[in-house]
Amino acid sequence: LLVQAGAWLAFRTGLSLRWLNGREVYQALAEARRPSPARVVVFGDSVGRQLYAPQGKMRDDIRVLCSTAAISLAGQYRVMLEAARAGTLRGTEVVLICHPVSFEHDLQDQFTYQYFIKPFWIPANRDWLSPAVLARVRQVPWHTAVHLPSIRYGNWNPDWTAPSVQLGVRTTNYIHDLAADYLRRIADLAKREGCPLRIAAPPINQTWADEFYDPDRFQAEIDELGLQEVFGPYAREVPVRPPDWFIPGDIIHFRAARLQEMGSDPLGLLRPQR
């Protein structure tokens, strides 16, 4: 009992966040509740966070609720729901910043336990967990152990890798079934809150794009899923940049020098939209 109480207290005081993997998820949830004068609210993956909150520095002109692709679009929806419940979403413009690969995350990889199950697998969240999410969580060993504070607020993970035959009917495409479901939920929540919604694409690596990104195929999936209104021109407006823009060995995140060159609003979120 003392171990569990100590783990809970270390988290509540912020001490354990210093070394906790996935702390950006908890920070996004906390930031979602904070009153802010910002009229633009940004959700999304670690690329969005790198572009708009480098070193985790928050700002007042744009509310940055980005965390990581590992929480999937289900996790992004939960962060958005936190802002809606706190009354901090209404009257803003909602922007979802996602690298194209982020729509493939569907809670069936080695990051699921630390980044999704630990922060979100609590009884109060059951009302927004779809059958697909429940099925994915329940296939992960020791998923119920996160009810112990020493597990939930630590970095221990079970020895588990994604199953060779994954759940879902869309597991080899750009937009997996779980992402499509929660994109619709995100769009519905934005409408209920009276918030315009758009998806913005960060620059992607030319090397990765040449091998993996086909804008026509991506658009065909958008059309097949009926998500044209949600995505808008996303598929064909993904900017491509040379490999030297990116950290060596990391095809997704940017070099510090390039971040400085792009400035404080690299995707032009504060510019009036056409």
Image: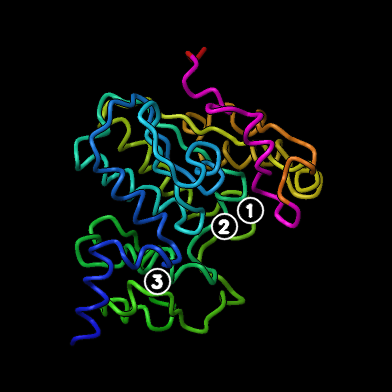
Residue 258, magenta (yes or no): yes
Label 2, secondary structure: give it: loop
Disc 1 to disc 2: CB gap under 8 Å: yes
Q: Nearer the viewer, residue 172 or 20?
A: 20
Residue 209, magenta (yes or no): no
Residue 224 picture quarter: top right
Q: Please give left or right for residue 7 compared with residue 139 in the image.
A: left
User: Depth-wise, is mark 2 or mark 3 nearer the camera?
Assistant: 3
Give the Cα separation between the discs numbered 1 and 2: 6 Å
Image point (47%, 55%), residue name: 72
| Region of the chain picked out in magenta, as a range | 248-271
Q: Which residue is mark 2?
A: 170
Q: Please give left or right for residue 50 compared with residue 30 in the image.
A: right
Residue 141, image x and y in percent? 42, 83
Disc 2 to disc 3: CB gap under 8 Å: no
Q: Please give left or right for residue 160 compared with residue 90 in the image.
A: right
Q: Nearer the viewer, residue 168 or 204?
A: 204
Task: Name the N-terminal-most of marks 2 and 3.
Answer: 3
Q: Few, some or many C-alpha atoms within 10 Å of disc 3 (few <14, some 14-19, many ≥20)? A: many
Image point (63%, 36%), residue name: 259
Image point (32%, 82%), residue name: 145
Which three-letter amino acid code belongs to the residue tagged 3?
Answer: Val
Residue 234, image x and y in percent? 59, 31
Which three-letter amino acid code belongs to the residue tagged 1?
Answer: Asn
Q: Which residue is mark 1?
A: 173
